[in-house]
Structures are given as C-alpha cells and as structure tokens.
C-alpha cells in the first residue's frame, strides 16, 4: 500500500510513522521546499502540485501541514481531483467504537477519544490529548499536544486549541479561533480571535 504525504515537516514525520505502523509500506513525500529532499527516512519526490502523478487506485494521500487553511485548501484540491485521502490513527490511541473520524484526520499516540464524539476532516488530534464523550470537533481543527476537551464540547472549523489547554464541559468555541498554550476555557467563545489565560480572555 502506498501513501503520499503532502508536507515534509515535523508533523509529516510523525504522521508517516503512524502510516508505517498501520501497514503502509511505500511512503513518499511531496513538498515545495527544495531544501527538504527527505522527511526523516522517507524520500521527498516532488512538489505539492505533482500529487496527481501519483494518483492511482492503490495510493492514498495525506496532507501533513500544520496550518489549517493550507491543509484545508490542499486536501480539497486532492479530493476534487479524485485522490483518496487516508485517516491515520496511531495503534496506541484509545478510541471508542462509537466515534466518527473524518478523512485526512491524524490521531496521535496516547490520545483518548470517548463515546459519542464526532471528529471532522483534516483534524489533528495531537499527542496525549483527550476528547471526552459527545464532543464535536470541526473540520481542520488542531487539538494540540496534551489538551483536554471535557464532555459535550464543540470546536468550530479551523480552530487551534493550543498545547495543554482545557475546555470545560458543555462549552462551545466558534470557528477560526486560536486558544493559547495552557488556556482554560470555561465559557462559550462566540467570536473568532486569539484567547489566552485562566480563565480565557480575548487577546
Ligand atoms: C496565543 C499565541 C498564539 C500568541 O502568540 P503571539 O500573538 O505571537 O503573542 P506574543 O507571544 O507576542 O504574546 C503577546 C502577549 O500575550 C501573552 N501570551 C501569549 N500566549 C499566552 C498564553 N498562552 N497564555 C497567557 N498569555 C499569553 C504574552 O505573555 C504577551 O503578553 P504581554 O503583552 O503582557 O507581554 C501563542 O502564545 C500560543 O499560545 N500559541 C499556541 C502554540 C501551541 O499550542 N503549540 C502547540 C503545537 S502542538
């Protein structure tokens, strides 16, 4: 099975390792940065727009770019061109059977995702984070390392919940927000922006 990653940075390296663990044997990268001729032990074989050259029934694609807007744009282009997008779940993630996960989402090692939760497309559920029961995580969000979403939390599209943040139960955060490292969100956030502190305040 072949998988072609788009984005050869550190995030790509972690995603490729998951791909190997779940059985992909042929792992390639594409990146527009000429300096990056490899991503860890995997070869960089071309530029982002070369992806169509690799599209065949035995190939999956995965966009491993941290920036949500770029990740969204490229994933949509690949999908539009008929490319199949993989979903990558680390074997050491604990994910309830009653969880839905969209295409292009990466679930890293040490995460816990509990029953009734729906995770969108192109989401990053990063290392050692937890997402409790009945949450909704919108497309292209990033739940960063060590973050905790309590039960029945909603996160809008393209929102980045920074490392070690906590979102209290039944709280909604709208789309297009950045929640800073270590922030504690205890009330709904209804307008896009950057929020930091304990409790969270708009920056
Ligand atoms: C919130 C964030 C985006 C702000 O970045 P920025 O716009 O460059 O802001 P600055 O670093 O210039 O800081 C501006 C002010 O906000 C404060 N601030 C920044 N981040 C903060 C945080 N997480 N908590 C509390 N205060 C914070 C700074 O102390 C500074 O305060 P001052 O004006 O009184 O000196 C960034 O600090 C952050 O938390 N990013 C998330 C990173 C992350 O989660 N990475 C995980 C990768 S897996």
Image (cartoon, grey):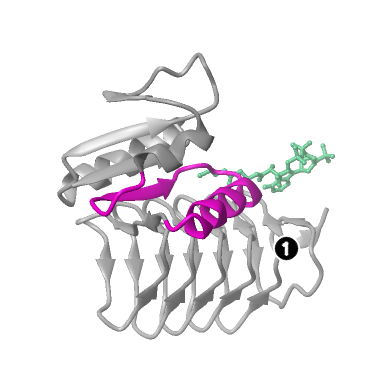
Q: Residues within 10 Å of mark 1 (few under 14, many from 20)?
A: many
Residue ID at (26%, 46%): 18
Quick one: 56 or 173, which is closer to the camera? 56
* Quarter of the rendering containing residue 91: bottom left
Query: On the image, numbered disc 1 is attached to which residue?
Result: 200
Q: Residue 143: horizontal and vertical position, in percent?
A: 51, 58
Is 42 rendered above or below residue 134? above
Query: Which image quadrant shows ligand 1?
Result: top right
Q: Residue 195: horizontal and vertical position, in percent?
A: 75, 57
Is 150 rendered above or below residue 77? below
Asked if residue 62 lies left or right of residue 176, the reply is: left
Q: Is residue 172 visible?
A: yes
Residue 144 in magenta stretch: no
Quick one: 87 or 117, which is closer to the camera? 87
Q: Is residue 143 visible?
A: no
Residue ID at (53%, 36%): 49
Figure disc tally: 1
Which residue reaches farthest top?
Answer: 35
Kind of element beneath mark 1 = loop
Asked if residue 177 lies left or right of residue 107, the reply is: right
Point out the stretch of residues depicted in magenta. Answer: 55-82
Residue ID at (40%, 37%): 53
Is 36 rendered above or below residue 55? above
Asked if residue 195 lies left or right of residue 159, the reply is: right
């Amino acid at each position: 099975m072949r998988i072609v990653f788009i984005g050869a940075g550190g995030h790509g390296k972690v995603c490729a390792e998951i791909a190997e663990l779940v059985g992909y044997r042929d792992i390639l990268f594409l990146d527009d940065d000429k300096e990056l001729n490899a991503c860890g032990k995997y070869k960089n074989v071309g530029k982002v727009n070369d992806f169509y050259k690799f599209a065949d029934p035995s190939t999956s694609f995965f966009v491993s770019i941290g920036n949500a807007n770029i990740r969204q744009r490229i994933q949509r282009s690949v999908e539009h061109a008929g490319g199949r997008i993989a979903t990558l779940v680390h074997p050491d993630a604990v994910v309830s059977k009653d969880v839905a996960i969209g295409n292009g989402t990466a679930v890293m090692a040490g995460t816990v995702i509990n029953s009734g939760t729906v995770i969108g497309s192109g989401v990053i559920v990063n290392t050692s984070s937890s997402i409790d029961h009945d949450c909704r995580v919108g497309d292209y969000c990033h739940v960063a390392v060590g973050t905790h979403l309590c039960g029945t939390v909603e996160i809008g599209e393209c929102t980045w919940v920074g490392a070690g943040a906590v979102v209290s139960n039944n709280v909604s955060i709208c789309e297009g927000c950045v929640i800073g490292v270590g922030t504690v969100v205890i009330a709904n956030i209804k307008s896009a922006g950057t929020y930091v502190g304990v409790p969270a305040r708009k920056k």
